Amino acid sequence: MSWSAIIAGAGSGSRLGSPIPKALVHLHGEALIVHAVRSMKDAGIEQIIVTIPEGYAAQFESELSHANLTAQLVVGGSTRQESVANGLRHVTTDYVLVHDAARSLTPQAMIHRVMETIEAGTPAVIPALPVIDTIKQVDCTEKVVATVQREHLRSVQTPQGFSAALLRTAHTFSEQLSVSEASAITDDASLIELMGQPVTVVRGDSCALKITTPFDLAVAELLITTHQAGKA
C-alpha cells in the first residue's frame, strides 16, 4: 500500500515565545520539522508534504537539506484545516497520514499502529491516550456546571491515518459548514465524524506530546537526553 504524509508546519511560534514559525524552532540541535520529517521517512512514507507559512520556503529547505532530508513544501492556509486541504491536493497515494510538526518525538511503533490498522481495512484511525485528569465543565463565568466522566474520554494525538479518498470527501464536505461549525473543527477526524463515518482509536504514546510552550520544549529535550543516555 502506498502512503503519503501531510505534516502541518505552518503554525506560528508565538506560544513558544519565538518570532519564527514553530516548525523551525530547534529541539536538540535540529528544527522540529526535521524531527517530524525524519520520523515519517523512517516509517517508510513514500511522499512527504509539509505545509509552511508563506515566505519561509528557503528556511525550511535549508533545515531539511542540512539533515539530508527532502519534502514537498506547500504554502498553508489561514487555518490548520485549510493548510491540510492545500497539502491534500498534492497527495498521489491511496493512504495518507496527517501529522503535526510539533509532535516531533512520535515513536515509530505508534506510527506503524496507525498504518497497520488502516491497512487492515479501517478507513479512519487516530492515536489517543486515556484522559487521566479530572475534567470539569464550566460556564462563561468559570463556575463548574458538571464533572465529565473520563472513562470514555481520550486525548487525541497525531499522526491520524485515512483513506485519501475519504479525507478528500471530508474536506469537500467541510466547504458546506457554517463559520461556527468550521471553527469547532480541530482535527481531520472531526470532519469524518461530522459526515457520520466511524473513526477508530489506537493506543497513543506519551512521547508524542505536542510541543506548544517552552515547558513542552524543555520536556522534549529531556526525553531525548534521557533516551540517548539509556542507549549509551
Image (spheres, helix red, strand yellow):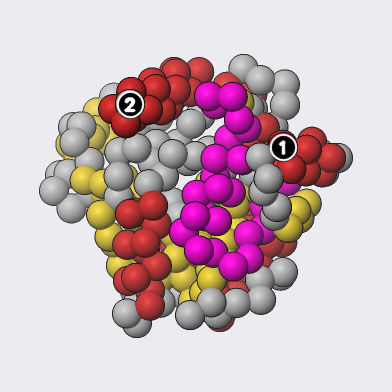
Q: Residue at x 53, y 24 (%)?
A: 28
Tell me, for residue 66, which label it has, or none.
1
Q: Position of residue 20 (x, y in %)?
A: 72, 26
For the residues labelled 2 and 1, the Cα–Cα distance comes to 25 Å
Compared with residue 24, is residue 185 higher up or lower down, i.e. above or below?
below
Q: Are marks 2 and 1 in contact (CB under 8 Å)?
A: no
Which of marks 1 and 2 precedes in the sequence?
Answer: 1
Q: Nearer the viewer, residue 99 or 27?
A: 27
Residue marked by disc 2: 232
What stretch of residues is rendered in magenta?
27-52
Q: Residues within 10 Å of mark 1 (few under 14, many from 20)?
A: few
What secondary structure is found at the residue carrying circle 1? helix
Left or right: residue 142 versus residue 14 is left
- Name the amino acid, label 2: Ala
What secondary structure is found at the residue carrying circle 2? loop
Rendering quarter of residue 127 = bottom left
Q: Position of residue 43 (x, y in %)?
A: 46, 59
Q: Residues within 10 Å of mark 2 (few under 14, many from 20)?
A: few
Compared with residue 190, is residue 57 higher up or lower down, i.e. above or below?
above
- Name the amino acid, label 1: His
Q: Residue at x 33, y 54 (%)?
A: 109
Tell me, for residue 225, which label it has, or none.
none
Q: Residue at x 50, y 63 (%)?
A: 44
178 drawn magenta: no
Q: Quadrant of the C terminus?
A: top left
